[in-house]
Structures are given as structure tokens and as C-alpha cells.
Image (cartoon, rainbow, N blue to C red):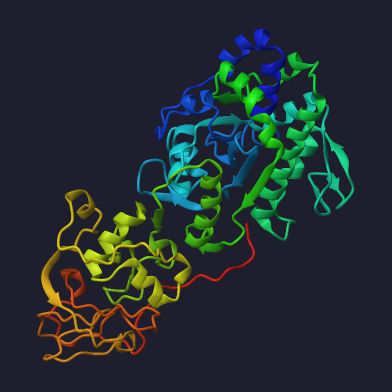
Amino acid sequence: MVVVICAIAFKVYADISGFGSDIYEDVNSAQLRDADAQLRNGEPITILLTGLDSGALYYEDVEETRTDVMMVFTINPKINESTVVSIPRDALGVQSDTDEFDKLNHAYMNYNGIEGTINSLQRYLDMPIDYYVNVNMQGFMDVIDALGGVDITPTLTFTQNDVSFIEGETRTLSGIEAMQYVRMRKSDPEGDIGREKRQQQLIEAVVDKVISLGTITNYNDILDAVGDDIKTNITVDNMFALQSSYLAAMDNLNKLVFDDYVDLNLDFGYYMLIPELERLENVTIMQDNIDYEATNSATVYPVEYGVESTYFPVSDLNWDGVLTDDEMAIQPGVYSREDLNELVKYIFGYSINDYLESTGNTDLIDENEDQTIPTTLDDELLEHITAGFDPSGTVTEDTSSDLDTYGDTTTEEDTGTYYDSSTYSETSDYTDTYSDTYSDEAPATSESMTVPEEIVPETSQEAPVTFEEPVTDMPVEDSTVTE
């Protein structure tokens, strides 16, 4: 939608000045860089386009509005290239500037509208969002109609609310027809991902239509159409700059989706998990397009959502057959990879790389990762250790161990088998619950390490609990998206 407004700004700058004030709305989200300076200097920028599930059709009176569409564009005028990535609305992620997790499209509803959405997506994508354009359903349809419709070649045959589409048959869609085309997901074998691809297809068609029009003669109709249904933090001056220097790059658009995902069908709702490798692959493409030096983020998801831990082990310390967030040594949240590695080494005595190698998840290994085991951490990092995991006592590592000993019951003389065969000064025998699903050799080092007391079972039990097959994280299988 911003493409349309910017094109109008270029043609009729004087007439749009008042309109620009009507749709302008600043946002108090975290500022990762000076966006206006990027624009003034002709540097790459990012724009978030959100579509709200309100304003028209059956959703005119929706009270708890969510972002039904979330697309992040990177635009690089220096190389005349752009990228767009669609964020699944049900994707599990952090909410705004908190460490709470929920569907990413709930951030708008629960954390002060577009501010919460921007904060969430900046952390999820590990990159700045310079500008946003927020449009509801009515504004979306009105813009399409004011442009005289857009040409679309459907990618599959389906009917949505009495509007039929035939695969491969190009037609000009009105606003309401375009809305039906991009909202359908039940009949799409790719579910939400298929819908995101159709949304991107439509946005590209709008860009093509604006570029092909050359001179927009009915701009007053367009301004009247979107005046009440669109908000943006792009000023009129910046719209002019976008049109003159950035629009051409939108004609060379690389479209990205997160098409490798895990369905989380839980008792309390449906969520979509984007595995870390998939997330980082698309994020890297986006970062490269804007020459952005990122923090190399790592997301620690709550295991209570049925998510398998990626960067460190989580086991059933309470022996109740259920993994809970309280059993995670490190709290859920978004970390820099460097900070998370320091926490993992401090608590477990080995690096993230060692853990990834032991689990066979080698695609996430960082060749430049620091392997030195820290003896202390700063207070800010210590705050991310879960309450009850109070690191104390130094344990010497037995370098002859491997992961095949995982889960063995120990004796009073051999007082405990940990992931790296460290020993504890306890007199009770127990089965090490950090057995999960590992089979490769554990890292061998002579470093001393600090371990959390919570890992060691209470010694007051008359009969220690053991498992023939220790409780593990429960991997969730990929499956077709369901409602």
C-alpha cells in the first residue's frame, strides 16, 4: 500500500501534504538505528507492512484486532534489489520487549498495537524495522478498486465465499475478490504458507500496476479511499524520497517464506514453530540485502509449548514425565548467540557447539564460537538463570566419558553421571535425567565447571527413582497445517 501512496506523493506532492498528516502516526518502538538518516543518505531501509483482521466483511466490529498479515521488506537502492519475508501469523515468538511467548500476531492485540508488533519482529528477525504501514481490510480493498483492480494468475483452483478462482487463468480482481484470494487457507495444501505466497503475489501485482500506470490520474479517489484505514510513520517528504530513489528496487523483489515449520497442536491452542535453522537462513538473506551487521541472535523457546530445546539440554528433573519451563536452566527469551554460549558454558561446562554436535544439529554450529569455560558471569547474564538453578560448588570433569553412559544409575562411590561425566559430592545414587536423545561422544576437557544444585536429586528419598529410558524432550513431527 505504501507503494501506491509514495507514487502519488511523487506526482502530486502539494495536494498530498494535508493527507500525509492525516495518515501519519509515530510509534514508540525500540529504535535500532536512525531510519531517516538511512533514507536521506540513500542507504538500504526496511518497511513493515501489516494487514489487520478488522474493518470490513465479517470483521467490522472486531474488538481485539490482530495482524493477519505481516510482511517485512528490505529495499536496497544501491544494488536495485529488494526482499520480502512473510511472517506466519501463528508463529511462536517473543512478545514486544518482554520474554513472554505467544503467537506473533497477538503482539498487536496485547502490547500497544503496532509498537508491540515492531518490537516483536525486530527481535524475531534480528534487524531494525525502519518504517511501518498498517492497513485494515477496507483500506486494502479500496486501494485495489481505486487502481482499477489488479491482474492475478491464480496458483490453484478454489472457491472462497462464492468467489471462484481457476489455476492458471489470469483475471483482473476487484478489491473484494482480491481479499478473498489472499484470505483462503483451508483449501490450500500449504495452509498458511500457501496463503502467504498468494499475499506476496498480490503485493507484487500492486507494485507492477503502480509502475505501469506511469501517471496516476485518479489520486483523489485513492486518497479518499485509504484516509481512514491506513496509518504509517512515513512522512510526506520521506514518501517523496522513497518514490524517487527506492521504488525501482521494488521491481526486483526476492520473495521469502518460512516453509519449514513444525505444527504445535496443544491443549491450549495451535502454534507454528519455525526451527532456528530456517529462521536464521531467511534472516541472513534479509540482513545481507541491507548490509546490516546483526547480533547473531538465538531464541530459547519455552519447552511447555512442546518445543525441543535447541541450544542446551532440558530434562525431567521432577521425574513426573512432563517437561516444564522451571526445568530449563536458562530462561526462555531472545539472546545474542555469544551471551547464550556464555550461559551454557557456565552452567553445563561445555559450549553450544559441543551440544549441537552431540545432538547432530551441526548446521547451527558457529565456527568462531568461544570454547573457554567462564568461572564467573556478570549480573545481567546471571539473571537469566532460572530460579532454583543456583550455580554453586566446583566439579571436576571425567574426560573419559561419552554420552552412552547417559542415564546409568550411579553408586555411592561414583556419585553421579552428568552429560560430561562430572561428579557431584552427594551420597545418594540416582539416574541422570539429562539423557535426552544424545549418542555422540561428549566434549572432553579438563576444565572445572559449575553446576546447578537443582540438578542433584534430594537425598532424603528412601528409594531413588530411576528410568530404564529417561524422559526426554518430545520432538514434534512436521505435519500439514490445521485450523
On screen, residue 265 above or below 42: below
Front in this rendered view, residue 376 or 257? 376
Front in this rendered view, residue 344 or 157? 344
> Residue 158 location, x and y as percent?
82, 52
Residue ID at (62%, 13%): 19
Quadrant of residue 74 in the image? top right
> Residue 163 location, x and y as percent?
83, 43
Residue ID at (23%, 58%): 385
Answer yes or no: is residue 398 visible. Answer: yes
**In what quadrant of the picture does the N terminus appear?**
top right
> Residue 220 location, x and y as percent?
74, 13
Left or right position of 477 against 433? right
Front in this rendered view, residue 92 or 17? 17
Q: Residue furthest front?
A: 78
User: How many numbered discs?
Assistant: 0
Left or right position of 365 against 482? left
Quadrant of residue 24 in the image? top right
**In what quadrant of the picture does the C terminus appear?**
bottom right
